[in-house]
Image: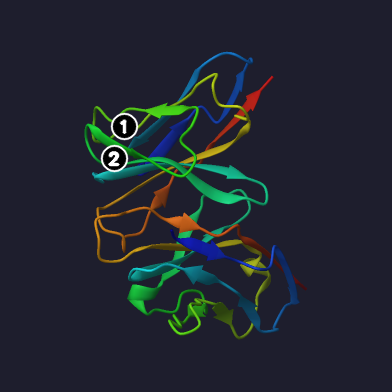
Amino acid sequence: DGGITQSPKYLFRKEGQNVTLSCEQNLNHDAMYWYRQDPGQGLRLIYYSQIVNDFQKGDIAEGYSVSREKKESFPLTVTSAQKNPTAFYLCASSWRGGYNEQFFGPGTRLTVL
Amino acid sequence: AQRVTQPEKLLSVFKGAPVELKCNYSYSGSPELFWYVQYSRQRLQLLLRHISRESIKGFTADLNKGETSFHLKKPFAQEEDSAMYYCALSDSGGSNYKLTFGKGTLLTVNP
């Protein structure tokens, strides 16, 4: 089964804990993205990476961190500094170029208890 | 800064009626516009993009640079069109691959 995968599907975290969300793709895409989806807010870009070992902040990067050590992997860490982390997180990947389609994973729902 | 506005959070039509989902954008560069769709319990996926000039599932969208709009239209709505629709914008020619999404419109097609 090819494409883009995210794990886990559901994640629960206690306040004050960091947690890492996994995103893997086997599409050989150069670019990868993390979005946060909240009801009534649409999708907001957290971080994106256009190439291995490089990434840029999106619109709401505060309280999050990423790494891009391998082309196929782009994990997102939600730190304790993120004030309102409960949300649905979507990962995507694409070929380079602003006109290219982004392919989305199934998402991870994070709940902070 | 790039911005996408979808003025309707909810849109409800009857089967067979025409449907238009509105999208307006603000961007000083050369925009590329997209419509993404999320059906119930499915992944977010591309519906269509301006550069392809294609019709997908009976939907079309025309880029109007004068009005800075990219409205999505279908002449006869079907129940299976019920979904959340997002308009999105990126820079077509530069090295910026960021997609900016609107807040989405939930379309319900009633029988």
> Mark 2 is on which residue type?
Asn
Query: Which chain contains the residue that carries disc 1?
Result: A
Q: How is the image coloured?
A: rainbow
- The residue wearing badge 1 is A73
Which residue is depicted at the point 24% across and 30% down? Answer: A70
Q: Quadrant of the C terminus of chain A?
A: top right
- Place of residue A86 in the rendered image (x, y in percent of width and height, measured from the top left): 63, 30
Q: Which residue is mark 2?
A: A26
Residue B37 spot, x, y in % from top left: 54, 61
Labels 2 and 1 in the same subunit: yes
Which residue is more in the foreground, B39 or B65?
Answer: B65
> Tag 1, which secondary structure?
loop
A103 vs B21: above or below: above
Task: Say which residue appears at 24% left-offset and 45% top-offset.
Answer: A30
Nearer-the-camera pick, B24 or A101? B24
Q: Residues within 10 Å of mark 2 (few under 14, many from 20)?
A: some
- Image position of B26 (left or right of A85): left
Quadrant location of residue A87? top right
On residue B68, the disc is none
Label 2 is found on which chain of the structure?
Answer: A
Q: Which residue is at a point 22% across and 35% down the rendered structure image?
A: A52
Q: Which residue sits at x=31%, y=32%?
A: A73
Direction from residue B58 to residue A26 in the image, left or right:
left
| Image quadrant where one finds the N terminus of chain A | top left
Q: Amino acid at mark 1?
A: Ser
Between the C-alphas of marks 2 and 1, the distance is 9 Å
Closest to the observer, A56 or B72: A56
The image shows a total of numbered marks equal to 2
Q: Position of residue B61 (x, y in %)?
A: 48, 79
